[in-house]
Amino acid sequence: MHMDARKLIRECNDCQVHRPVPRNPQQNLTPITSPWPFYKWGIDIAGPFPEGPGKVKFLIVAVDYFTKWIEAKPVATITGNQVKKFVWDNIVCRFGLPGEIVSDNGKQFRDNPFKDWCEKLCIRQCFASVKHPQTNGLVERANRSLGEGIKARLDERSKDWIGELSHVLWSHRTMIKSSNGETPFSLTYGTEAVIPAEIGMPTLRTMEVDPTKNDEALEINLDLIEEKREQAAIQEAKSKTKMEKYYNSRVRGTSFKPGDMVYRSNDASHARDGGKLGPKWEGPYEVAESLGKGAYKLKDCKGNELPRTWNICNLKKCYIHEM
């Protein structure tokens, strides 16, 4: 009777499309690492925020994977030209050409002029899977942290979030990161920044400062910056190994091969009307190609390949066509 009930549910299309979405991870975690500072950047767009001066309501955010240094710029529109100008002004002109840029599949990143510009400068583009921004989790956390920091500094009388952005960025750049035990400022410039709190409540280095000895200490810090970065890289590798072990312990191994029939998460595709009574899954589709690391190309019942890639977290095996 149990086998008959299971077979009946698998053959029922309504039971399949309304089946709960699994919350456990479907694929092992793949940590993203950078070999040296400012080589690999993650970039994303946050917003819309309340409209500010100049009709500004979006925020382009970029994070360096090694130092965790954050760059952000408010913009009124999110075009490819705006993204190209942001990368040139805030990354290339300050830290040199990056080797890789990780982003989502937004048309501002994957289409010209930004795509052609990256190819000309030999910048490799890496894309997160559609509707699965967790694959670029560092920038997603930065977006959330910037938003929470800005909200915490605003009150009912003031809605000038653009004026608070620089303060929030400063706090992130001078904050010790738990993953490597260092601040982005020290990994970038070789020494810790003097913060305003050290003036209001003097510390040893501000009270006993000697210009001559201070210059010598700064030179020593610059000589030792490579060792500091190496220690930070080792510490971060340990942290990521611990995180990866915890994440992978909850993984329910799932994979598909070309020819398999799958359903696609309706929350990710928005192919059908949602709502409380809307379907959680839609399809079925055929797996056209496995790209590795949980990414797949799909095609519909007419054989047309769907645009972009789809993450395994947004897919579910279809049993109906196997019966």
Image: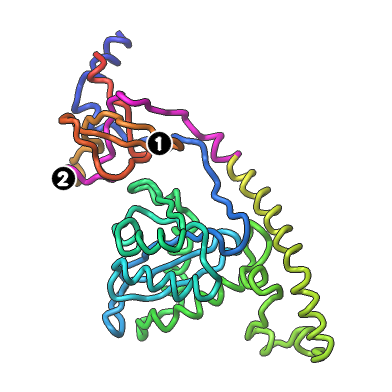
Q: Position of residue 86 (x, y in %)?
A: 41, 72
Question: Was residue 315 drawn as part of the magenta stretch in this picture?
Answer: no
Looking at the picture, does residue 214 appear above or below residue 32?
below
Spot the residue most to the top. 1
Q: Which mark is residue 291?
A: 1
- The reply, left or right, for residue 132 in relation to residue 192 is left
SS for callout 1 = strand
Q: Amino acid at mark 1?
A: Leu
Give the residue at mark 2.
273
Image quadrant where one finds the C terminus: top left
Q: Quadrant of residue 51?
A: bottom left
Q: Position of residue 310 (x, y in %)?
A: 33, 40
Viewer-side residue, 314 vs 109: 109
Q: What residue is drawn where x is 37% and y is 40%?
A: 311
Looking at the picture, does residue 227 appear above or below residue 316?
below
Question: Was residue 258 drawn as part of the magenta stretch in this picture?
Answer: yes
Q: CA distance from mark 1 to mark 2?
A: 29 Å
Q: Position of residue 147 (x, y in %)?
A: 42, 68
Viewer-side residue, 102 vs 314: 102
Q: Amino acid at mark 2?
A: Asp
Q: What residue is drawn where x is 33% and y is 35%?
A: 315
Q: Which mark is residue 198?
A: none
Viewer-side residue, 57 vs 301: 301
Q: Position of residue 74 (x, y in %)?
A: 37, 76
SS for callout 2 = loop
From which residue to which does the magenta span run? 245-271
